[in-house]
Image: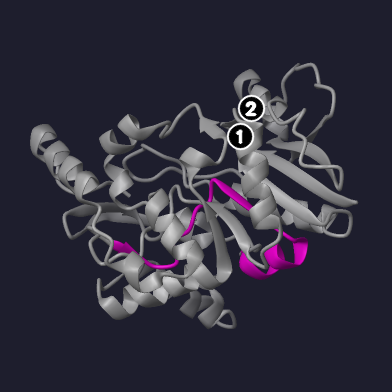
């Protein structure tokens, strides 16, 4: 019997709790037993009736700070702390662990089961294609080591190997003067989709000062060699499920084909064709894949809205 842990992490609300409840009757097969937990913060504790089958876990909130434009919180340490708690407390108890952002719900159990069974058999981390920076050469910006942080799955040992599990001083990430790169504006020195992964830190683990130098270099030159290197790393280390085919839905983000093309950030993401190419190891083809419709939508949106680039 394989024991599977599904862990949600985020703000505890009735809507987010309902997202976790949507997994309550998920059946993966006779050889799989599922447990579900929801990780929230103690100061977020509310008088909610604890639902059957879901264990609510309250941790001390590491808190977070906002970017200079006050638009978003960094929220990196919250991700790191919750992931570390999962590993520290459940690594010996479960064969496979899935961590999910709290606003994602299950809408098609059959699709999810299919993707899970593919991922479970592979010696890789399981992620979604949103928001995964595409390694193709036709992308407005190439972000280094940028992989999905909405959702990950893997054996406890693999998660320990791939995730960065040490909290940091989040103020180091703040761009006091927003940085413009290829018409894109950066309000932080690195993205969570980069920093939750140990690969972003691995080359200089032993030097605290050197470690923080990476924040000034969160992108890389768009080139065939860099694209190939990134695509090959994705293929060797991740099984990527297309969000649109995963059986999952999000209340706040891309839902379908129309909203995909309306969202400027889709130009950075792998679509299901690119995902297929990378999963199958057709990395050369994937880096030359032309996202023509998304590129046109991206340019039209910038033209009509009077905007240039993306906000990070």
Location of residue 119 with respect to 204 vertically, above or below: above
Residue 82 makes an appearance in the image: no
Q: Secondary structure at mark 1?
A: loop
Residue 95 screen position, x and y as percent: 82, 57
State the residue position of label 2. 19
Part of the protein shown in magenta:
142-163
Q: Secondary structure at mark 2?
A: helix
Instruction: Write down the quadrant of residue 301 in the picture.
Output: top left
Location of residue 47 with respect to 266 vertically, above or below: above
Residue 34 screen position, x and y as percent: 82, 41
Q: Does label 1 or label 2 sit earlier along the sequence? A: 2
Residue located at (52% from left, 82% from top): 203
Q: Residues within 10 Å of mark 1 (few under 14, many from 20)?
A: many
6 sits to left or right of 200 = right
Instruction: Write down the quadrant of residue 246 in the picture.
Output: top right
**Render colour scheme:** one colour
Residue 143 screen position, x and y as percent: 35, 63
298 sits to left or right of 121 = left
Q: Are marks 1 and 2 in contact (CB under 8 Å)?
A: yes
Residue located at (53% from left, 46% from top): 75
31 sits to left or right of 203 = right
Residue 28 makes an appearance in the image: yes
State the residue position of label 1. 102
């Amino acid at each position: 019997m394989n024991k599977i842990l599904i862990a949600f992490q985020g703000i505890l609300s009735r809507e987010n709790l309902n997202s976790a409840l949507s997994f309550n009757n998920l059946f993966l097969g006779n050889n799989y037993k599922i447990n579900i937990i929801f990780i929230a913060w103690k100061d977020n504790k509310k008088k909610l009736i604890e639902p059957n089958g879901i264990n609510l876990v309250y941790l001390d909130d590491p808190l977070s700070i906002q970017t200079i434009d006050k638009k978003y919180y960094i929220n990196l340490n919250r991700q790191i702390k919750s992931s570390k708690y999962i590993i520290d407390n459940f690594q010996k108890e479960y064969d496979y662990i899935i961590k999910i952002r709290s606003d994602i719900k299950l809408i098609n159990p059959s699709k999810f089961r299919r993707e899970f069974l593919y991922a479970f058999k592979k010696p890789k981390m399981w992620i979604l294609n949103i928001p995964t920076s595409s390694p193709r050469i036709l992308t407005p910006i190439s972000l280094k080591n940028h992989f999905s942080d909405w959702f990950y799955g893997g054996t406890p040992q693999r998660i320990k190997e791939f995730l960065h599990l040490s909290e940091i001083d989040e103020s180091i990430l703040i761009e006091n003067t927003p940085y413009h790169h290829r018409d894109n504006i950066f309000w932080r020195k690195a993205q969570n989709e980069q920093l939750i992964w140990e690969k972003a830190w691995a080359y200089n683990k032993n030097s605290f000062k050197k470690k923080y130098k990476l924040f000034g270099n969160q992108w890389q030159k768009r080139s065939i060699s860099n694209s190939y290197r990134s695509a090959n790393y994705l293929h060797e280390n991740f099984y990527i499920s297309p969000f649109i085919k995963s059986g999952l839905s999000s209340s706040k983000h891309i839902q379908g084909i129309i909203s995909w093309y309306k969202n400027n950030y889709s130009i950075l993401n792998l679509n299901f064709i690119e995902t297929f190419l990378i999963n199958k190891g057709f990395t050369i083809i994937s880096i030359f894949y032309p996202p023509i419709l998304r590129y046109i939508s991206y340019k039209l949106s910038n033209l009509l809205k009077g905007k240039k680039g993306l906000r990070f």
